[in-house]
Image: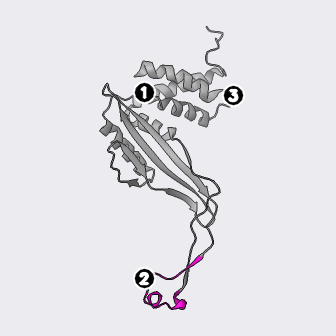
Amino acid sequence: MRSRLSTWVTVGLLWGACGCAVTPETRQQLVETTSGNAVYNLSADALLTTTRRLLAEQKYELLPSSDPLYIHTTWRIRGNTDMGASWSRIFVQVHPLSDGRAVVRAYRMAYTTNGRAPMHPTLGAGTRDSKLGDGAATAYVQGEPMSPAKPIVRRASDIEWEVLSRVEPRLAAHLEARAEAYLATGRKDPSAPTEEE
């Protein structure tokens, strides 16, 4: 797995670091990008168990699924839905390969709401007065959260990296060391020769 992933490390480093300032976020982006190419010698069940544990630690609530190789969560809301909030949910699919290995693909659906729709009247369904048609039973309910845009789905490389670092800690440490070494050279193009070469 290392030889194949080492090739992708160089590609990921080039792609993630071109033109970027070296910051902790840059280093993290480099290692997370490479984790998306990992192929595991573990069973799908082991990968799913690790992923479920990770999502529970991040305060995501899992939903039931009819596909045993698929995990999805409810919406996690950060902020005040009356004023504006960030919504996110995670989808993870484990793909078994024909040679007995497996890959993990994680995605995050996210969007931001900027308040609620106006309150609107309801007939108070289920109350005795509403069944009699009494207009005094009318109540107002809060409107749904509004969003100016549709949800965005992106690859959740941070989730994939966390899974990799938990099930293959030695490989994760190796990738972090390679990223540090690359960033220390200060080169914008990893294929350009250095003075030592």
Q: Position of residue 87 (x, y in %)?
A: 54, 55
Distance from the alpha carbon under mark 2 to that under mark 1 = 59 Å
Q: Nearer the viewer, residue 26 or 65?
A: 65
* N-terminal-most mark, 2 or 3: 3
Instruction: Indicate left or right for 77 with 97 as reference.
Output: right
User: Element at badge 2?
Assistant: loop
Q: Position of residue 10 (x, y in %)?
A: 55, 21
Residue 127 forms part of the magenta stretch: yes
Graded by Cα atoms within 10 Å as few (under 14), some (14 to 19) or many (20 or more), the crowding at tag 1 reads some
Please tell me the numbered disc located at residue 79.
none
Residue at the spot of label 2: 126
Front of the two marks 2 and 1: 2
Determine the image quadrant of residue 186: top right
Residue at the spot of label 1: 171
Residue at the spot of label 3: 19
Distance from the alpha carbon under mark 1 to that under mark 3 = 27 Å
Q: Position of residue 37 (x, y in %)?
A: 46, 28
| Segment tinted magenta in the rendering | 120-137
